[in-house]
Image (spheres, rainbow, N blue to C red):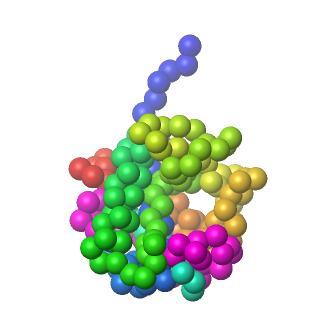
Amino acid sequence: MGHIRAVSPALLLIAAFSRHRAAISWARETAQAVFGPIALESPLFDFTQTDYYASSMGIELKKTFFAFAKFYDPAQLADTKRTTNRWEEQYRTELGADELRPLNLDPGYLNESKLILASTKDHAHRIYLRDGIYAEITLSYHRRQWQRLPWTYPDYQTPEYHAFFDQCRLYLRDEMRTPHRFETAGD
């Protein structure tokens, strides 16, 4: 029989994208109020790999990632996805824009071996968590680099994203060596 072990430390990541910089700023402030300080934030990347979101979000989209300072409990991923979905709706109804979806928030987590994203859509490679939320391994870390999988989104395959995820992974490893780091996001 296998022995049950504590879950590996992880960092909460939230991808925020929009054509409105104000929406991304709002997402940053809202997320920090709930999950605590952001340890690392990526540059604003041009989101040009697909036009899938053009009809609901417009064009000239920008995407950034927030990695939070506190360790994240992966068991909270379904709750986090439902929270970010509520924030998207809140932004749309209260602050609005011309688009059907002015802000898109995709939470996930990163640990030493993988990057997991949450989704509301089922597919063969996704595992049901609860409350209508699924999870997928989007990237794995193997042989000192991020490895794509057959279903990895095109933007998550870019060297620029991988460079940021490398920074997150190094931050996580450094924090794991710090004895006081057992507080988790949302505490």
Front position in the image: 108 or 159: 108
Q: Is residue 169 above or below residue 26?
A: above
Report whether residue 127 is seen: yes
Query: Which residue is at 46% across, 29% downward?
Result: 5
The answer to whether residue 34 is magenta is yes
Report whether residue 111 is seen: no
Where does residue 28 sit, x and y in percent of width and height? 34, 73
Q: Is residue 122 above or below residue 26?
A: above
Q: Which residues are magenta?
A: 28-57
Query: Which residue is at 49% across, 83% downward?
Result: 19
Front position in the image: 7 or 57: 57
Where does residue 54 sit, x and y in percent of width and height? 59, 77
Quadrant of res 68: bottom left
Query: Looking at this rendering, what residue extends furthest in the top direction?
Result: 1
> From the viewer's perspective, is 89 left or right of 65?
left
> From the viewer's perspective, is 92 left or right of 151?
left
> From the viewer's perspective, is 6 left or right of 181?
right
Query: Which residue is at 34% across, 78% downward?
Result: 96
Where does residue 187 sit, x and y in percent of width and height? 23, 50
Where does residue 9 sit, x and y in percent of width and height? 43, 47
